[in-house]
Image: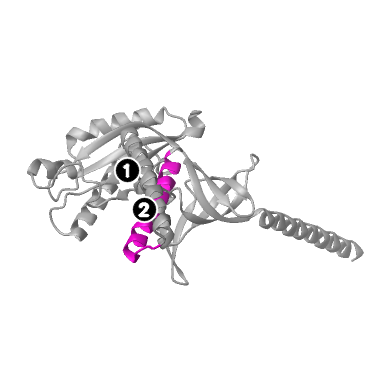
Amino acid sequence: MKAITSSIERIALKVTLILAILLLLGGVAAAQSIQVKGVINGRSGASMSVQTQDSGNVTVILTDATQVEEPEGVFRKKHLSITALVPGLSVDVKGSYNTQNQLVANSVTFKGSDLRTAQDIQAGLTPTEQQVQQSQQQIQAQQQQLQQQEQQIHAQQQKSAAHEAEIAANKAAIAAANKRFGELGDYNILGEVTILFGNDKVAIEDEYKPQLVALAQKALGITAYVIQVKGYASKVGSAALNQKLSTERAENVTNFLEQQANIPLTNILAPGAMGTSRQVAPDTTAEGQAENRRVVVRILQNKGIAGT
């Protein structure tokens, strides 16, 4: 009887030790769970940089298991692709640090309004070098004009309400342009393809598919690249229809790059639905309309990584 009691006591002691170890391990795992809030200020391949208020820049690693979510009410969440994580987006990241002190994301959450704001910023992210130079010259001209106007106002000592509104508008335009061109310094354009579409068409014509494949192969050989996709429409038809067409064209190109050209979604910025903005030709002719029904695909690389 004593032997049986002693055996039971030993078993109970072992069970108690096992439970204690499990509780300790669970506590350690829970302690390693991290949550940070901030703004995405860079994407490089499958990683992104998040500027936080308390911890500075945090490097976040995105994986196939990372959940990208947009809350819809108290209990519902909309699940989105990793491509939605664009620079300028305010995010809430939950995950754990790896041995390189990088935060491996389990989930990334953001508001729909913040995504729309970030996409608007991205829409003007990468104009050509010629456009940059022209815009910079325009900024300088606006600044000189603003200085002259301010001197005239100071000399007159009296300003009309209309003149004040004009000055304020000029200042806002200069500030907005300076902000855009500050962001331009972050990326190099290393490749570009333009795909044209028929009227009311969203499917990719066969003639453009080899060009997309070649662009993808070039991108795969570039360190920390990202692919930017922006869709456009002509001004024929309603604004709502053209916005829808530009969205579907950009999404179809994105799907082709992922499924046919082997570009991971982690390396693609969210498709930009540009609607009828940035027309490249007059819509008064059939030829001009054809040029405006397009999707522009670019390979971008962060200049910090390129060393430029």
Between 60 and 7, the one lying in front of the other is 60
Q: How many labels does the image show?
A: 2
Majority SS type along the magenta span = helix
Tag 1 secondary structure: strand
Give the image location of residue 234, x and y in percent. Answer: 17, 49
Colour approach in the figure: one colour
Is residue 189 rendered to the left or right of residue 240?
right
Tag 2 secondary structure: helix
Would residue 255 be seen by someone viewing this image from the given angle?
no
Residue type at the position of mark 1: Val
- In the picture, the disc for residue 229 is 1
Does residue 260 show up magenta in the picture?
Answer: no
Q: Name the residue under label 2.
A: 170
Where on the picture, by quarter, is residue 98? top right
Looking at the rendering, the stretch of residues picked out in magenta corresponds to 158-184
CA–CA distance in space, label 1 to label 2: 31 Å
Q: Considering only vertical position in the picture, is 114 above or below 102?
A: below
Between 225 and 80, the one lying in front of the other is 225
Would residue 219 be seen by someone viewing this image from the given angle?
yes
- Which residue appears at 85% of the width and 63% of the height? 9
Is residue 94 rendered to the left or right of residue 185?
right
Give the image location of residue 166, x and y in percent. Answer: 33, 58
Q: In which quarter of the image is the N terminus?
A: bottom right
Residue type at the position of mark 2: Asn
